């Protein structure tokens, strides 16, 4: 399962948001998510860029996705900005890492598929967050490293989280190199969250630029991920090596 994340890489421009949506609708992917930010974030950029998409766009996106059996999600971090969208029926929600202990926001989330981005949260904070969702049917955890330093990566934490909390655990790619994405396959995450940005022929610096993938490169990337699965899981290989005129089976 791969969730494509637009985040706010649309810059609040509805025509650009529709390009992401159109790509998604025509693709083989089944999950797409947008993001609403905090009031503090919006005010910081309001004189230059309005990162907010109109509500009518989300209504349109949900309807279009459902018409072809696909799902639209919303990533949230702030109750004040989320209230405007409470009446919309998104298929799933992502709780951003910065809001992992925002219990007022958590209390307002509908009982749908919930994906909790862990960011730098320790086990205690994760446990407290999960407790607030105790009546929810489908909870998922996302291991996401928020640093671009390789020293801060700990992909083995995916296994730790699975054993500790007995929940599905995915990998959210938030690194400026593709290597951790491929290496994460060794730890068998249950799903992936991948940020996307518009076609590579267009030069632009996106809000999630350094860890996002151009949408025209995504299909090839996913084929590589599938190929890695073959390398890791094919138990029926029987290689024969000729050494000193003797055949050795491996």
Image (cartoon, rainbow, N blue to C red):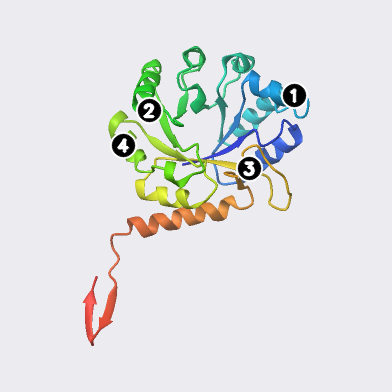
The residue carrying mark 3 is 209
Mark 3 and mark 1: span between their CA atoms?
Answer: 20 Å
Mark 4 and mark 2: span between their CA atoms?
Answer: 12 Å
- Observer-nearest of 80 and 219: 80
Q: Earlier in the sequence, mark 2 or mark 1?
A: 1
Where does residue 97 sit, x and y in percent of width and height? 49, 27
Total count of labels:
4
Mark 1 and mark 4: span between their CA atoms?
Answer: 41 Å
Q: Quadrant of the C terminus?
A: bottom left
The residue carrying mark 2 is 122
Other-residue count near label 2 (Cα within 10 Å), few / some / many at <14 / 14–19 / ≥20: few
Left or right: where 146 falls relative to 11: left
The residue carrying mark 4 is 160
Mark 2 and mark 1: span between their CA atoms?
Answer: 33 Å
- Whether pointer 2 and pointer 1 mark residues with C-beta atoms closer than 8 Å, the reply is no
Left or right: where 82 falls relative to 110: right
Helix, strand or loop under label 3:
loop
């Amino acid at each position: 399962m791969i969730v494509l994340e637009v985040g706010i890489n649309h810059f609040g421009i509805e025509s650009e948001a529709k390009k992401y949506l159109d790509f998604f609708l025509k693709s083989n992917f089944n999950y797409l998510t947008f993001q609403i930010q905090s009031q503090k974030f919006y005010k910081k950029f309001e004189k230059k860029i309005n990162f907010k998409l109109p509500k009518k766009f989300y209504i349109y996106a949900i309807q279009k996705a459902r018409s072809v059996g696909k799902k639209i999600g919303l990533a949230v971090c702030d109750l004040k900005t989320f209230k405007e969208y409470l009446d919309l029926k998104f298929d799933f929600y992502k709780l951003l890492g910065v809001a992992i202990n925002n219990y007022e926001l958590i209390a307002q989330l509908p009982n749908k598929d919930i994906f909790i981005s862990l960011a730098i949260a320790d086990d205690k904070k994760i446990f407290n967050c999960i407790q607030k969702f105790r009546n929810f049917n489908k909870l998922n955890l996302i291991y996401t490293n928020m640093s671009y330093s390789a020293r801060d990566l700990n992909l083995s934490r995916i296994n730790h989280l699975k054993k500790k909390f007995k929940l599905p655990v995915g990998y959210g790619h938030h690194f400026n190199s593709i290597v951790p994405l491929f290496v994460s396959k060794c730890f068998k995450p249950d799903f992936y969250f991948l940020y996307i940005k518009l076609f590579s022929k267009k030069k632009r610096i996106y809000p999630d630029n350094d860890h996002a993938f151009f949408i025209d490169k995504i299909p090839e990337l996913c084929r590589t991920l599938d190929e890695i699965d073959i390398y890791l899981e094919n138990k029926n290989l029987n290689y024969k090596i000729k050494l000193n005129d003797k055949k050795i089976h491996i």
